[in-house]
Image (cartoon, rainbow, N blue to C red):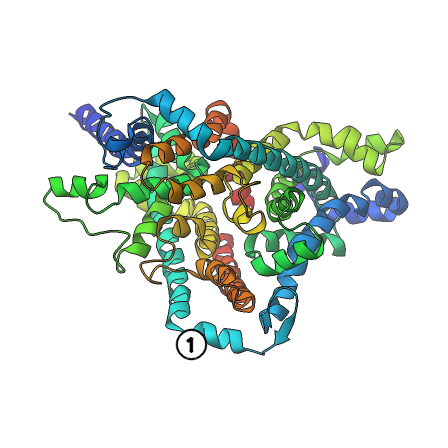
Amino acid sequence: MRALRRAGGELTALVVATAVFLVPFSFMLLTAVKDESQAQDLDFAWPTSWPIVENFTAVIQARDYVLLRAYVNSTILTVGSVALIVVFGAMAAFVLQRRAGRVGTLANFLVLSGLIIPPAIVPTIWLLQALGLFKTMPGLILVEVAFNLSYAVLLFRAFIAAIPRELDEAAMIDGCGGLRLFFRVIFPLLRPVTVTVILTSSVTVFNDFVNPLYFLPGDDNATVQVTLYNFQSQYSTQWNLLFMDIVLITIPPLLLFVFFNRKIVAGMTAGAIKG
Amino acid sequence: MTRQDAGPRTGPGRAPERRRDRTARGRQRSAYPYALYLPAAVVYVVIFGVPTVMAFYFALTRWTLFDSEFVGLQNFRDFFAEQNLRIGFTNTLVYAVVTSGLKVVLGLLLGVLLTSRLRLRGFLRSVVFFPVLVSTVAVGFTFTALLRPDTGLVNRALALVGVDGPDWLGDATTALLSVAIVDVWKGVGIATVIYIAGILSIPQEYYQAVAVDGGGAWHRFRHVTMPLSWPATYSVIILSFIGGLRSFDLIWTMTRGGPGFTSDTIASIIYKQYQAGFFGLSTAGNVILFVVVTAIVVPLNWFLGRRQATP
């Protein structure tokens, strides 16, 4: 009797969770493969025909291959900012963890501020314009680095805390100090947490919509999220193409999740709890 | 700290730091040069710090990016005088409270469920967490379709049980809350994994003690899981408050602050005023957001942190 109730409870939980969390995703997929007239209903129905390839090519070719260009832009943005976040974040976290003092206290305060304070939008635009970086990819990369550094520093700092100081001392005795100590000895040891930082910040930067919207407007260098947003007005009648676009944009995070599920979850939890 | 001599010294620990400072001050200094801070500090201070500070000045001006005219507190007066702008203030608070409240409750329940001996536990954890990684724009468009009044799945499902669902996003009374619930759908995965980590760190002895006393499942939940997962609750509340107060992209993709201005938040007003060319007013919105976030999160952090120290 108890086993039966258990199985019943399990089944209910499963059904509810599936309905709530998987139905929206199946809706995306189903709408993406419908033909234009059926997709217009925007209802949850089985497709009557399956123009998968046609929809796919239509989305890719739309507006002179804007989606492909957007993918290139998003890749440059993600790779560029994540590389800088990792290197700058690890360097800062190392000193921050190892060296207490007034500077350390200030740095700690800045890291926490970075997590809490919402960025001031128009003043940032004003500053980027003064530097000649507004509406440029390097400008947006620097913005992403500045806004996402704090989180990376937290993750790195927690990991560095577990690296024994004896190691630093041994390296110093061998005449390896300062920058060389960090890049030759410490940084290679950070690989596990580096992977975590790369994963979490890639997802954040790739999915970012607000910062590209503000700091890199214009169709030429739109990222995938902004393209998707622009598609909405353009495809108000072609919902199948809009959802095909959504599916294509969801694939990169899905792949990361399939391969690095544990790392991503661990990274996001660790940062949250330390924060 | 007592184990320090037995094992390698780790952690920022002030005590060993000071001791070594006395013996090898010079070498200590060269080992961890402040130069390592430099690249991060430059990018952070220039791109994030300077605009944050300058915002306090530009918020007091009428501003075209190229020149600014000092107008005192006029922008703030406008912000609170106009109904359309003031509503964003209330909405932001409502949105943050609703989303973090629901994330705490649902995250805790899902956390308990997903740490129980469920056969499909791994699968369910993935399913609950995945929306966190999906782009907000994609989630916004998908739910806009699902919440459509006539053909949307939500109202179709409600019709099956005889309920006539409203126009969720088109009705001023439900728009903001609908977006908040979608926000919870997307973000509850983080809360859940935080709770899972918290629940798994509760020593089994407590549960055994309840079993010895003859307590049931409710007793276990009420007197062990709930109080002892307090650190997780603390993280979830702080995180979702910070996220909820700033939220812009989901609201923007689902309602654009509409119908009218009824679902505007401070962040969406900042964007609207920026688009309209009222840069000073937009920046005043930023300053208000800054004040709201700091005024809520810092005391909350202090208050919750104190409770954490003395459970």
Of the residues shown, which amino acid type is indicated by label 1? Ala
Graded by Cα atoms within 10 Å as few (under 14), some (14 to 19) or many (20 or more), the crowding at tag 1 reads: few
Task: Give the secondary structure at mark 1.
Answer: helix
Residue toward you, B73 or A271: B73
Residue toward you, A102 or A139: A139
* Image quarter in which the N terminus of chain B is found: top right
What residue is shown at x 78% (from left), y 35% (from top)? A182
Residue toward you, B214 or A61: A61
Most distant residue in the left direction: B162
Q: Is residue A151 visible?
A: yes
What residue is shown at x 23% (from left), y 41% (from top)? B152
What residue is shown at x 73% (from left), y 31% (from top)? A187
Residue toward you, B188 or A163: B188
Query: Residue B155: x percent and y percent?
Result: 19, 44
Query: Residue A68: x percent and y percent?
Result: 52, 30
Q: Please indicate whether residue B264 sits to the left or right of residue A67 in the image.
A: left
Q: Is residue A120 visible?
A: no
Query: Residue A54: x percent and y percent?
Result: 36, 23
Q: Which residue is mark 1?
A: B81
Most distant residue in the front direction: A64
Quadrant location of residue A244?
top left
Quadrant location of residue A251?
top left
Q: Chain of mark 1?
A: B
Instruction: Examine the rendered structure and indicate whether residue B139 appears above or below residue B14.
Output: above
